[in-house]
Amino acid sequence: MKKRIQELSTKISELHSQIKEIGLQLKPLEEELEDIQDKEAEKETKRREKKGIVINTDENGKEWFTIPEEWIDDFTDEDCVWDIKGEKFTYVDKHRVNGDGEWWGIIVKREKDNKHFEFHWGYSHGSGNYYYNETWREVRPTKEVKTKWE
């Protein structure tokens, strides 16, 4: 029995040494991966900044594009004009959007052609974090008819 205990102890000690060695080999690989990911993210940011706003069109002919958070000073701001890559967007309105916490749909008007766009942002009361959805979609106003009874 004592011999088996000694064998197991030795084997466990060897495995711990191997695990430590693997950990030492793993650390530089993880650091290299993180560096590469950071560089790729930096390249993507520079590419976006260089291109400016890239307009896409959906199947209904409405425009949509992405505005990275770093391009917009304060997405919670109201009664303002955002100058984003040389294009001016004026705050128009906001409305509640379903979701966990407090979510808002923000309506803005692009000044060059008076088209309206919507983006969403939210606030989590639990975590205290703000969230911003980078996708801005063209929206068009609709008239709502109400019947009033007197």
Image: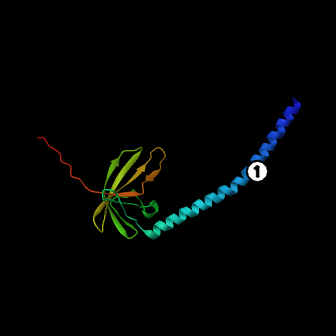
Quadrant the C terminus occupies: top left
Q: Residue at x 54, y 64 (%)?
A: 42
Instruction: Examine the rendered structure and indicate whether residue 52 appears above or below residue 1.
Output: below
Please state the horizontal and vertical placement of residue 89, each as a whole percent of the image: 34, 64
Please state the horizontal and vertical placement of residue 93, each as a whole percent of the image: 30, 55
Q: Residue at x 85, y 32 (%)?
A: 4
Displayed quadrant of residue 55: bottom left
Disc 1 crowd rating (10 Å Cα; few below 14, some 14-19, many 20+) is few
Front residue of 130 and 111: 111
Q: Residue at x 47, y 50 (%)?
A: 129
Instruction: Examine the rendered structure and indicate whether residue 52 appears above or below residue 138.
Output: below
Please state the horizontal and vertical placement of residue 51, each as a whole percent of the image: 44, 69
74 on left or right of 145? right
Displayed quadrant of residue 99: top left
In the image as oriented, which residue stretches furthest toward the right?
3
Displayed quadrant of residue 79: bottom left
The number of numbered badges drawn on the structure is 1
Instruction: Examine the rendered structure and indicate whether residue 48 appears above or below residue 30.
Output: below
Front residue of 67 and 1: 1
27 on left or right of 85? right
> On the image, numbered disc 1 is attached to which residue?
21
